[in-house]
Each structure stands twice: as C-alpha cells, then as structure tokens.
Amino acid sequence: MDRLGAMNLYCHIVESGQLSLAADQLNLSKGAVSKQLAKLEAHLGGRLLNRTTRRLNPTEAGIAFYERAKLILESVEEAECVVSGLTIEPRGTLKINAPMSFGIRYMGKLLAKYQQKYPNVMIDISLNDRQIDLVEEGYDLALRIATLKDSSLIARRLAPCHIVLCASPDYLQQYGEPKTPSDLKNHQCIRYTYSDSVKYWTLENAKGEKQQIAINSPLASNNGTLMCDAMINGMGVASLPTFIVGDAIRKGEAKIILDDWRPKMEDISLLYPSSKHLSAKVRAFVDMAVEHFKPVEGEANDWNYQIIR
C-alpha cells in the first residue's frame, strides 16, 4: 500500500466530507476513492469514517489519524522543499492553545496579521486555562503565563506579566485597606484555582524579602476576567495580571494595595515541542508573535503598567 497516497486521499475525504468531492479533487472516480478508503481501513484494522446519507464524519480514531496524517504530509512537503532549494511556504493547520482572558484580549490582532501574510494556513485556536499536554493533544503551540518548569518543550519569552494585589474602593471603604501582608489574613481574597498552592499568596518586597500568607477565599475561579469583575463589585482582594486589571485601575474601579509587596512576576511565553526541523508554519508564528509583543521604544514599562497592548 502507498501509505502517503492513502493518507493524502483520506485527508481530502475528511476535509471535503464527501467521497465525490474528494474524487474530483484527486481526479479519481468515486469508486476508486471508495475502494482505496476500504483498503486503508482494512490495513489499519478499524473504521475511520461514519457514513451518513449526506456526509462522512470521522470516528474518534479517524480524527486522531487525520491529525497525524496531516502532520506527516506537511513534513514530507517541507522536506522536499529543503532538498529542492525552494522557499518553504507555511501551510496546513496551526493548532494553538492559549489562556482564556489573554486570548480574548490580545490574540485576535496577531492571528489576523498572521493569516493575512500566510493565507494557506488555517488557524485552530482553543482558549482555556487548564494545563494541556501539547504532544498528547496534538497542539503545535501553547501560550503560557507562568514560571516554566524544565521540560522537553522549547519556550520563547514574549513579554513580562506583572501581577498586582487590588481591591475596589467600596470594599476598602467597608473593610479597610491592608497595610502589611499579614493584614490579608483578615480579608476576603479571591483565589485563582490552578493548584492547591494558591491557598497561599507569596509576596516579595524590593529587598527580596518574602512572606507567605494563608488566604480566606469567598470565591475560587480559574478565569482572571471573572475574578476581576468580582473584585470590582466588592467581593474581595484579588491578585491579577495588569493586562486584565489595568483598565479598571485607570478608571478608578480598582486600587492597587500593598504597593511595596508584589506577587511574583511571571513570563508570557510560547511553548512548542522540541524539534531540530521546526515546521514553517510554527516558526513563522513564533517569529511574528515575538515581534508583535515586543516593547515599544519609549513606552512606559513600570511594574503596574498594562504591558500588553
């Protein structure tokens, strides 16, 4: 069996949804396409497609096979371009994962710029705040806002992420403003639920001194935008990135507290699997993202500034 040919045929079927359309695209008869599909399923020992009267829909195994087959076909095409000396044009599907709040605010402009420059790339972006496994879940790239642990992934830093403690003026008027980190023990603190460790806040001053404070939480959430809205409405003190809370601070809806004690600054980074031969679509996106988010010369860059534009 011509495995690459069978993968190419199967990808055309999945993308068109019909045998007849795939046959037209490949200049084959519908019968020939159906026969090759049957041979592929027999070779793999499982059904790839569920057949209805109007459309062919991939099974769970069929989706997994399609995603991997596309990667293989793209890699073969790039390898041929390298040998022939041709410029490798980014193409295929670029699968990205990013945090919800950051993605909604700041990814749209970058994605539009990328797609305009590389129209042969289809972008598939998922927004959620859970920690995904890039390799296991088939992502090309993931944007992370965290102190990254050692791993087999490559990280490209895009920008700093400054984090501040803040509360609404109404909350501070009712409960008083904390003057020291230990005062937080007597306040309601809105908690971000990425791990058990966030039941404690670790704060640091300019001298490098640290304090770890146990917090009481009326609300725990995995989404910063919701936390910011709850904080603005007087629910408690929140630890939030300035790219989320910056507008509220400027409008007077939120106030930075404990100015001399700050949560640890994090990095905004792009992660992708380690590879000596990075695909053209991933390399182009990483380069464009680094350029897109780099600091503007002369722009304010103090710790409580909304860095990401």
Image: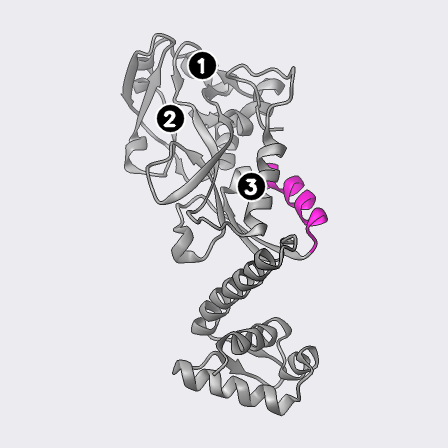
Residue 105 in sight: no
Q: Element under label 2?
A: strand
Residue for badge 2? 189
Span of residues in magenta: 103-119
Residue for badge 3? 286
Image coords of residue 205 (percent x, y)? 36, 11
Distance from the alpha carbon under mark 1 to that under mark 3:
36 Å
Q: Element under label 3?
A: helix
Disc with the residue nearer the chain's start (1 vs 3): 1
Query: Quick one: 282 or 208, which is closer to the camera?
Result: 282
Of circles 3 and 2, which is in front? 3
Residue 117 belongs to the span the image colors magenta: yes
Query: Quick one: 202 or 225, which is closer to the camera?
Result: 202
Q: Element under label 1?
A: loop
Of circles 2 and 1, which is in front? 1
Residue for badge 1? 257
Disc with the residue nearer the chain's start (2 vs 1): 2
| Mark seen at residue 240 | none
What is the three-letter code of the residue carrying label 3?
Val
- Label the magenta part by its dominant secondary structure: helix
- Label 1 Cα crowd, 10 Å radius (few <14 / some 14-19 / many 20+): many
What is the three-letter code of the residue carrying label 1?
Ile
Disc with the residue nearer the chain's start (3 vs 2): 2
Residue 229 in sight: yes
What is the three-letter code of the residue carrying label 2?
Cys
Residue plotted at (70% across, 54% down): 119
Residue plotted at (50% across, 87% down): 38
Image coords of residue 113 (percent x, y)? 69, 43
Residue 198 belongs to the span the image colors magenta: no
